[in-house]
Structure formats: C-alpha cells, structure tokens
Image (spheres, rainbow, N blue to C red):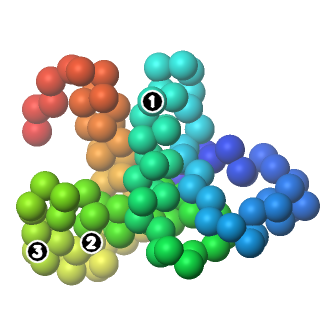
Amino acid sequence: MAQTALAGLPFTAKELFTDMAVAVAPVARGLVRVREAAAAAREIMTDLPMDGTGVATLSDRWRSVTRHLLAGVGCELGQIVFPYLEKCTELERTKILETVRSILRRAASGRPVAL
C-alpha cells in the first residue's frame, strides 16, 4: 500500500480530522510528485459524499474515484470492469493499483503511455 502523510501522525493528531472530510494523497516522494499527489487528493475530495466526515485515502476510495473519472469521459467500463475487480484478491488489487499509479505518473510527466 502507498504510504500517506497521516501514517506517521500520533492518534491524537488524527483525532483533529474526525469531524470533517479530509482527503489524504500518497506521500509525494520529491518535488516532481507533488502535482500528482495534489491531483489524487482533489479526486478523493471530489468523490466524497457531501455530508462525509473522516479521513479518506486513495486506497480507501479507489473504486469510487475510478468510476467517477471514467464517467467523466463518457466511459461506462464500470459495468464491465467492477464486477471482476470485486472478485480479485488483495494481491491482484495491489498490482492493479501499482500499475495504474505508474501509468498516471508517466502521463502526468508528459511522457507517452503505451499499454
């Protein structure tokens, strides 16, 4: 799993966020990754329910964020893909998330992405 900034905080600091909705992106390893982390946090926040509270990470919200992004480009792959994603193992899910992160990093840097 990707490390988040909240992972190193003591429990008392995490309690500060219990009454509000907070999106936490994976830790940006270096300045070049800050844009990607900010975009991830924005997508998580956009995806949260209006009356939601607590801390949400990309790992927590990946399914809903993916569905939201696909719908935004007129793609209803969720009807085909999500039933299979629900059945995959934790290891398979982790590998899929690692692959998607790699593709997003490459795309965010302006490099071509080939599948």
Please report contact status of discs 1 and 2: CB closer than 8 Å, yes or no. no
Which of disc 3 and disc 1 is earlier in sequence? 1
Q: Residue 85 carries which label?
A: 2
Q: Which residue carries the number 1 mark?
A: 35
Residue 64 % position (x, y): 35, 69
SS under mark 1: helix
Of the pair 105 and 15, the residue shown nearer to us: 15
Q: How many labels does the image show?
A: 3
Quadrant in which residue 30 is drawn: top right
**From the viewer's perspective, is the residue at label 2 or at label 3 nearer?**
3
Q: Which corner quadrant holds the C terminus?
A: top left
**Mark 3 highlights which residue?**
80
Identify the residue at horizontal 9%, vertical 62% (top origin). 75
Report whether residue 91 is seen.
no
Identified by mark 3, the residue type is: Ile
Q: Which amino acid does label 1 sit on?
A: Arg
Q: Residues within 10 Å of mark 2 (few under 14, many from 20)?
A: some
Whole-percent x, y for residue 28 in the image:
56, 32
Real-space CA distance between mark 2 and mark 3, rounded to the nearest whole angstrom:
10 Å
